[in-house]
Image: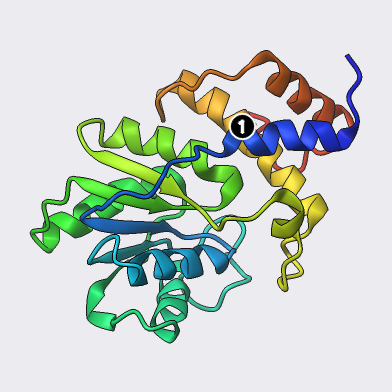
Amino acid sequence: MYRPVEDNIALVWNYQLMHHPLQKADCILALGSHDLRVAERAAKVFLEGWAEKIVFSGGLGRLTEGYFKKSEAALFAEVAIAMGVPEESILLETASTNTGENFRLTEQLLLKHQLAYTRFIVVQKPYMERRAYATFKKHWPEKFCVITSPPLSFDAYCQSNDPEINREAVINLMVGDLQRIKLYGERGFQIPQEIPGPVWEAYRALINAGYTKHLLTD
């Protein structure tokens, strides 16, 4: 069935959003990326009093290696401190290179600091909310989490001061992330997520339109 490309974009974008209301937690876990607005969202959630500690997790990944001069976590922390988050309220995990490592290495960091947290607010980019949730629940099935992201529409999200975050790049990235939701669930890297038929049709249509730059080929 033919749909306008904007409708396909909206189907994939909206599917990724978990729409979790914020709840009190032990810790805010901000997953590193090339988008510093994730750090701003994490800082805002902290400053509103939803948790007393922030972990910024991220070394250099496929989008930031050669682009960032410091680890994603270090740059995120700088953003948060500039917004008023006390440095003593921040922990840094600076070695992870993917979402699975974000959780595995953060767990090691918390154990090192003898922090037995059970309730988390996970902060990620909007089009990666669902994959963050599915990976969290695979790694920490017994723990509680809500997922949040910068509260932006697709069009607003693409209007970034960062030239690396533009309409074409975001569509390619969210198509690649939807593929990973399916494949990683099948491979046991995250808990499976049901993908409604219209969403998968929209995904296929976007691939046919040429948005293939971040698809896995193995």
The residue carrying mark 1 is 15
Left or right position of 181 against 179: left
Left or right position of 6 against 145: right
Q: Residue at x 41, y 45 (%)?
A: 21
> Within 10 Å of the Cα at label 1, are there few (<14), some (14-19), or many (20+) other Cα atoms?
some
The image quarter containing residue 203 is: top right
Residue 48 percent coordinates (x, y): 35, 68
**Residue furthest toward the left?**
114
The image quarter containing residue 128 is: top right
Q: Is residue 112 above or below residue 176?
A: below
Kind of residue sitting beneath label 1 = Tyr
The image quarter containing residue 197 is: top right
Q: Residue at x 85, y 38 (%)?
A: 6
Q: Is residue 83 above or below residue 170?
A: below
Q: Give 13 or 102, whichever is nearer the viewer.
A: 13
Residue 148 percent coordinates (x, y): 46, 50
Q: Quadrant of the C terminus?
A: top right
Q: Give 24 or 115, whichever is nearer the viewer.
A: 24
Residue 192 percent coordinates (x, y): 45, 21
Q: Dot 1: what SS?
A: helix
Q: Quadrant of the N terminus?
A: top right
Left or right position of 25 against 64: left
Residue 129 percent coordinates (x, y): 51, 43
